[in-house]
Image: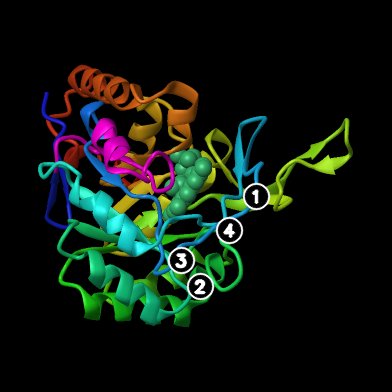
Amino acid sequence: MNVETEICGLKLRNPTMLAAGILGMTASSLNRIYDHGAGAVVTKSFTKNPKKGYKNPVIVEVDCGILNAIGLSNPGVKIFKEELKKVKKEIPIIASIAGSSPKEFAEVSKEVSDLVDMIEINVSCPHAGEGYGSFIGQDPKLTYEVVKAVKKAVNLPVSVKLTANVADIVEIAINAKKGGCDALTLINSVGPGMKIDIKTAKPVLSNRFGGLSGPAIKPIAIRCVYEIYENMEIPIIGVGGITTYKDVIEFLYAGARAVQIGTGILYKGVNIFQDIVYGLKKFMKENNFKSVDEMVGLAHR
Ligand SMILES: Cc1cc2nc3c(=O)[nH]c(=O)nc-3n(C[C@H](O)[C@H](O)[C@H](O)COP(=O)(O)O)c2cc1C
């Protein structure tokens, strides 16, 4: 059973990708995720200069997902480049870029453009710290400017990762497309949300608030993918709450051509990729699907 797919000219052996921010900081973890069956890998978001992020605790489990407030901690593009050089050549790799201005997004993207196959612009982190994050992806004009600057700086396909924390995600997406993006990644973590320790009566996360991910956000992500597919013509990468092959099928039916998995790895380990691909192949065989392509957008009939 063939589960190959293609997004913006990037050929994938299957539609699963590692989502940004989970095990994507080093070449060895990116290589390992590919060896465990992912079709492509996305790096942790990185910025021009190193960013310390928040103090621990930065992550906590809640009823149907997790809250995280990492604060975009990363070693900066110079050090990240050295990791990217060590990623195996056959791996389709997407660099997730964060920044505080169109200029920074463009500079960082350019710096790594020889080492990756695609850029994913992160304008949607709900806990990125001052000057960074979802305030950009909540502003149609700023989103347009960031995308335009990056597209001018690199000769690579560019996907924009959007936040669901907006009144009208289609308006933001239209502006991202006007800026020249080739695909959309939907969605980043939601909220922020909060957990309070009932013994200490204190917030658990050092930042108090954190982005919600995992099964709790899947229905929101599915709705966003469906809404964009219904209103625009642009390839979509779906992300949010995937833990099984059934979730992947829902994303494909909503309109995604590929999917990303983050929190699911924390629940199920790195074998999640091969387990999902196995389940997807079995489902396709039983339901007479010959290709992933045939499944994309089926819910819109
Ligand atoms: C610990 C953690 C760190 C994350 N870091 C990033 C990041 O650096 N850049 C980004 O675009 N998204 C980041 N995300 C968001 C994920 O890529 C993804 O969009 C979100 O978690 C929803 O997918 P999931 O439910 O499969 O985790 C992070 C998520 C988690 C849980």
- Indicate the position of residue 165 as horizontal and vertical percent values: 58, 60
Q: Are marks 2 and 4 in contact (CB under 8 Å)?
A: no
- Disc 3 versus disc 1: nearer the observer: 1
Q: Quadrant of the N terminus?
A: top left
Residue to which mark 2 is pinned = 136
- Disc 4 versus disc 1: nearer the observer: 1
Q: Say which label, 1 or 2, has the lower sequence index.
A: 1
Residue type at tag 2:
Ile
Q: Residues within 10 Å of mark 1 (few under 14, many from 20)?
A: few
Q: Are marks 2 and 3 in contact (CB under 8 Å)?
A: yes
Identity of the residue drawn at 53% across and 36% down: 214
Label 2 and label 3: CA atoms lie apart by 5 Å
In the depicted view, which residue is nearer to us: 57 or 165? 57
Q: Say which label, 3 or 1, has the lower sequence index.
A: 1
User: Looking at mark 3, is its residue's CB closer than 8 Å to ligand 1?
Assistant: no
Identity of the residue drawn at 37% across and 81% down: 103
Q: Say which label, 4 or 1, has the lower sequence index.
A: 1
What label sits on residue 126 in the rendered view? Answer: 4
Residue to which mark 1 is pinned = 55
**What span is in magenta?**
12-33
Residue type at tag 1:
Lys
- Indicate the position of residue 104 as horizontal and vertical percent values: 39, 76
Tell me if residue 46 comes above or below residue 257 in the rendering.
Answer: below
